[in-house]
Image (cartoon, rainbow, N blue to C red):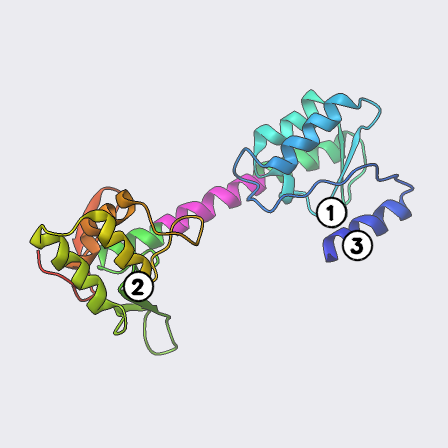
Amino acid sequence: SFQRGKLEQFSLEDNLDIVVRFEDVHTAKESGRPGFAAMLAYLDAHPAVRAVLVHRLDRRSRNLYQYAQLVEQLGVEVHSVMEPVENNAAGRMTHGMSAVVAKYHSDNLVQEVKKGMRAKFEAGGCITLAPLGYRNVPATRTQKATVVLDDRLAPGVRGMFESYAEGHTSLRDIAREAHDLGLRARNGGGVPREHVVQNMLRHPFYKGVVQYGGEQRRGLHPPLVSD
């Protein structure tokens, strides 16, 4: 990849020997990243290795605790390809400030996203992927994103509600109907479990209601079934 190429070029220019590589695709703000955890374990077990090479400082510093684990607990030098600093007091101060600033930007982004979701919910908009029987219509230059009934699937989903309301059809049978319509088990292949279908039949979205943070509002989308 582009980043790996930059890392290898940097190591050659600075005479650094790469002994092992770690990679994470998870967000750096969240703890529990398997690659980062594996790297910490490796550094703990190999005290002769005391340098970590990263593409950008903010890719490893959005979580201040993890930054402290590297620098303070393990005494590791962190080298950045895109933001090189000297390994001295001023450089370490720059790293620390970078960690604080990166965390601020990460937290602020989360706050702004939540604010946007709240505003969309207050207006009755759908803030998630539309459930089976509906489809999301992306925004255009002249029109906001909307949710409409899926002409192909909506009749079948409405039939599932009607079958269950009649009281003569089991959840297992309705789960098979849902599978035929396109609802899949979490593994992507089999018939969904009965509790998944039960939650679907209880979902307020189908009666025209959106929910967020434990609150409900009348949605802008058309209801598929009545209250």
| Among numbered discs 2 and 3, the one appearing first in the sequence | 3
Mark in the foreground, 1 or 2: 2
Q: Residues within 10 Å of mark 1 (few under 14, many from 20)?
A: some
| Among numbered discs 1 and 3, the one appearing first in the sequence | 3
Query: Does residue 110 belong to the magenta stretch?
Result: yes
Asked if the residue at tag 2 contacts the one at tag 1, i.e. Cβ–Cβ closer than 8 Å, the answer is no
Q: Residues within 10 Å of mark 2 (few under 14, many from 20)?
A: some
| Gap in angstroms between the C-alphas marked 1 and 2 | 51 Å
Question: Residue 5 shows which numbered tag?
Answer: 3
Instruction: Kindly identify which residue carries mark 2.
Output: 181
> Which type of secondary structure does the marked residue at label 1 adopt?
loop
Q: Which residues are magenta?
A: 101-114
Instruction: Kindly identify which residue carries mark 1.
Output: 83
**In the image shown, does 183 or 207 lie closer to the viewer?**
183
User: To which quarter of the image does residue 26 belong?
Assistant: top right
| Residue drawn at x 82%, y 28% as measured from the top left | 49
- Disc 1 residue type? Glu
Query: If the image is split into quadrants, where does the C terminus sit?
Result: bottom left
**In the image shown, does 113 or 220 lie closer to the viewer?**
220
User: To which quarter of the image does residue 131 belong?
Assistant: bottom left
Magenta part, dominant SS: helix
Q: Residues within 10 Å of mark 3 (few under 14, many from 20)?
A: few
Query: Does residue 180 belong to the magenta stretch?
Result: no
Mark in the foreground, 1 or 3: 3
- Residue 30 position, x and y percent, is 52, 37
